C-alpha cells in the first residue's frame, strides 16, 4: 500500500496511523481498506482528513472512558491535587505524591500506605492520587474500610464472597480509607485479611491509617494475623508519613483568631 508520509516529521505514515487507530477501534476492515482505496481512487489528499477524524474519535472514546471510571470510582468529590494545600506538606512528600500520580506503581502492583494523625490530609492525598490515576486510564475504587468490610462480610454470609472479591479485582487500585478506624470482630478481620491476601502482588492498594504498624494488633487482634497482614501490604510498598498538624485544627484556630480580631475591632 502506498505510504502517505507525515509532511513535518519522520513519524509513521498517515495511513499507518489510521491502520493502528482502526485496529484499536476494532474495525479491522476499515483499518486495512480505507486508505488504499482512497489513494487508488486519486484522493490521497483526503487521508490527512480521515486521520483527523480518527484522532477525534480516539479522544472522544478516551474522555468517555475517563468519565465512566470517575463514576465507578466512588472517590470523594473535589479532593484532587488542585484543591490540596501542598504548602503544608514537606517538599519530599509532595514530590512523592506527584510521582505516585503518574501511576508507575500501579504497573508494578505496588501499594501505597499513608500514615498520620487525623486531619493531616491522608484521605485527600489518597483521593488525589486516585483521581490522577483515573486521568491516566486506570480503574480505581474508593471505600472507607469499615464499609467495605461490612459489604464483604454480608457477601460471605450469602456464600458470595468469591464473587465480591472478583468484582473488586476488576479495579487496578483499591483505596482503603481509615483501615484502623473501627475495631474489627473475628469475622470482619477474616474478610479483611482475605482481601489483602487476594490482591497481594497482583493489584495495588492505597491504604490510609491513623495507626502505625505497631498498633495494627488493634485491627487484626491475633499477632500472627497482624504480622501476615503487615508483611503483605509492606512488601512492594511506598510509605507516606503525614507528620504535620491537623488541617481542621488549623482552620478552627484561624476562625477563632478572626473572631477575636473582629471583637477587638468593635470594642469602643
Image: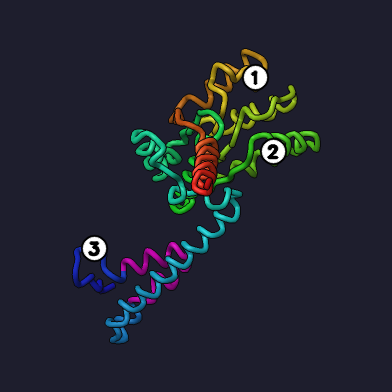
Is label 3 or label 2 in front? 2
Across and down, in percent, residue 245 comes to 48, 31
Residue 132, placed above or below residue 14 = above
What is the quadrant of residue 224 in the picture? top right
User: Which label number is shown at residue 147?
Assistant: 2
Image check: 61 left or right of 6? right
Q: Residue at x 29, y 72 (%)?
A: 1
Cβ atoms under marks 3 and 2 closer than 8 Å: no
Across and down, in percent, residue 186 comes to 74, 22
Residue 31, placed above or below residue 46 = above
- Outermost residue on the bottom side: it is 42
Q: Could one spot residue 268 in this view of the protein?
A: yes
Residue 17, placed above or below residue 170 = below
Mark with earlier residue (2, 1):
2
Is residue 194 a member of the stretch shown in magenta?
Answer: no
> Residue at label 1?
218
Predominant secondary structure, magenta span? helix
Across and down, in percent, residue 9 comes to 19, 66
Cβ atoms under marks 3 and 1 closer than 8 Å: no
> Residue at label 3?
11
What is the quadrant of residue 226 in the picture? top right
Across and down, in percent, residue 229 comes to 58, 22
Q: CA distance from mark 3 to mark 1?
A: 58 Å
Q: CA distance from mark 3 to mark 2?
A: 50 Å
Depth check, front residue: 75 or 69? 75
Q: Secondary structure at mark 2?
A: helix
Q: Residue at x 57, y 24 (%)?
A: 211
- Outermost residue on the right side: it is 158
Image check: 216 left or right of 128? right
Amino acid at each position: 500500500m502506498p505510504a502517505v508520509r507525515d509532511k513535518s516529521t519522520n513519524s509513521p505514515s498517515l495511513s499507518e496511523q489510521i491502520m493502528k487507530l482502526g485496529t484499536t477501534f476494532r474495525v479491522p476492515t476499515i483499518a486495512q481498506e480505507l486508505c488504499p482505496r482512497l489513494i487508488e481512487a486519486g484522493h490521497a489528499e483526503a487521508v490527512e482528513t480521515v486521520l483527523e477524524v480518527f484522532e477525534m474519535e480516539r479522544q472522544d472514546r478516551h474522555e468517555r472512558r475517563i468519565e465512566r471510571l470517575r463514576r465507578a470510582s466512588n472517590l470523594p468529590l473535589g479532593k484532587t491535587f488542585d484543591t490540596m494545600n501542598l504548602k503544608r506538606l514537606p517538599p519530599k512528600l509532595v514530590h512523592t505524591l506527584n510521582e505516585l500520580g503518574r501511576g508507575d506503581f500501579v504497573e508494578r502492583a505496588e501499594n501505597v500506605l499513608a500514615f498520620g494523625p487525623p486531619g493531616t490530609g491522608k484521605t485527600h492525598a489518597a483521593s488525589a492520587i486516585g483521581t490522577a490515576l483515573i486521568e491516566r486510564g486506570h480503574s480505581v475504587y474508593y471505600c472507607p474500610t469499615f464499609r467495605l468490610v461490612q459489604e464483604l462480610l454480608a457477601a460471605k454470609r450469602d456464600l458470595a464472597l468469591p464473587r465480591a472479591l472478583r468484582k473488586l479485582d476488576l479495579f487496578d487500585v483499591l483505596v482503603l480509607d481509615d483501615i484502623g478506624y473501627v475495631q474489627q470482630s473475628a469475622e470482619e478481620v477474616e474478610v479483611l485479611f482475605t482481601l489483602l491476601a487476594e490482591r497481594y502482588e497482583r493489584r495495588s492498594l492505597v491504604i490510609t491509617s491513623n495507626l502505625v504498624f505497631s498498633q495494627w494488633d488493634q485491627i487484626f487482634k491475633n499477632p500472627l494475623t497482624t504480622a501476615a497482614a503487615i508483611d503483605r501490604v509492606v512488601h512492594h510498598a511506598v510509605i507516606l508519613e503525614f507528620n504535620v498538624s491537623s488541617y481542621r485544627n488549623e482552620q478552627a484556630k484561624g476562625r477563632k483568631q478572626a473572631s477575636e480580631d473582629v471583637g477587638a475591632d468593635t470594642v469602643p
